[in-house]
Amino acid sequence: MIRFENDYAEGAHPHILERLLETNEEQSPGYGMDKYCESARTLIKSACDAPTADVHFLVGGTQTNTTLIASVLRPHQGVVSAHSGHIAVHETGAIEASGHKVLTLPSEDGKIYAEQVRGAHAEHWNDPTHEHMVQPALVYISNPTEFGTTYSKKELENLRKACLDCDLTLMMDGARMGYGLASEDNDLSLADIARLCDVFYIGGTKIGALFGEAVVITNGALKKDFRYMIKQKGGLLAKGRILGIQFETLFQDGLYMELSRHAVDSAMTIRAAFESNGFELRYDSKTNQQFPILRNMDIEKLSKKYSFHTWETVNETKSVVRFCTSWSTKAEHVSALVADINALKRQP
């Protein structure tokens, strides 16, 4: 079985495994206070052009989202998200379990826009009974989104302006950030993201690391006591150097973007095969996730050889599926899939 159902099926890039082995018996301080974490912080701050940022390392995305959101919000406040946002649909109510409501906005493409944020803010504060309702205080976005779509610089600038005008914190989930930065449509840099977001994180779990996310806090008001929050939420890894070594390796010599571009290039090859054979794409994703609409009989054929995710039902005969490439996707697997896509009968 050739697997295209997610971007974390493999272990870690060989360079990371080599570095972990090389340093395995070194003794170092715990909890991220070692020289490798410090080196990784320096590399990340340089890549973000954010010398005054705080950088922290956590193990996984859900843990990171929960810790960040809980650290920002007061007990009566909630987080605004697209209805399809990861925190709203794929984290088993982790945010609500920490005592904060996810306030969802409708979205066709996985993104939320400045005018929606302004509208949600106005709706709350214009209601004379607003003190009886959860107060919106944080805006959560992901880039790429759950649908593989990305924010333009202009869209992010507009969101930033809306958040400033409405006194809202802007947070970006970057679990797949590298794949967004490698998109042919992307006009954002890490420096732009650091400038426009109060806090964001750079994903490693899905882009070459065994596990790990690097939190970057640029808003000084959010920095205080964040390590306390990490510890309280169970995220302060005793062997923190394991995270530091991984991110140090990823951000040396351009490896992070090299791996990201490989996954996106593979996905674009797959996208081109679907398009050339007349298959419609549900979302206009130029990242590592592709969402073709296939006939159920075609899904059955491809499922004999490939593992992928059935995303949503279109009608009785068609469904949306997701093919997801990764930093480690093999060229021969992409070629095999393209050949099998070409062998399907063209759409009527």
Image: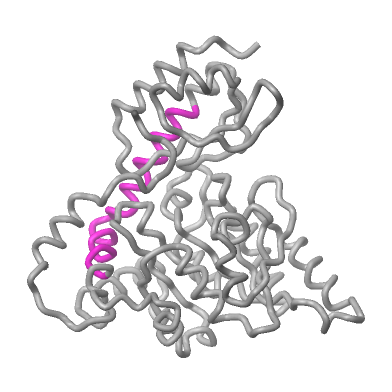
Quadrant of res 38 = bottom left
* Residue beneath the point at 34% across and 69% down: 44
Q: Nearer the viewer, residue 210 or 16?
A: 210
Q: Quadrant of the C terminus?
A: top right
Q: Nearer the viewer, residue 13 or 252?
A: 13
- Give x and y (percent) for residue 37: 26, 75
On screen, residue 40 versus residue 185, left or right, reads: left
Q: Nearer the viewer, residue 28 or 198?
A: 28
* Residue beneath the point at 56% across and 49% down: 146
On screen, residue 256 versus residue 79, left or right, reads: left
The residue at the far bottom in this view is: 224
Secondary structure mainly formed by the magenta segment: helix
* Residue beneath the point at 45% across and 62% down: 61
Report the span colored magenta. 244-271
- Give x and y (percent) for residue 260: 37, 47
As displayed, is residue 164 above or below residue 3?
below
On screen, residue 149 versus residue 101, left or right, reads: left
Q: Quadrant of the N terminus?
A: top left
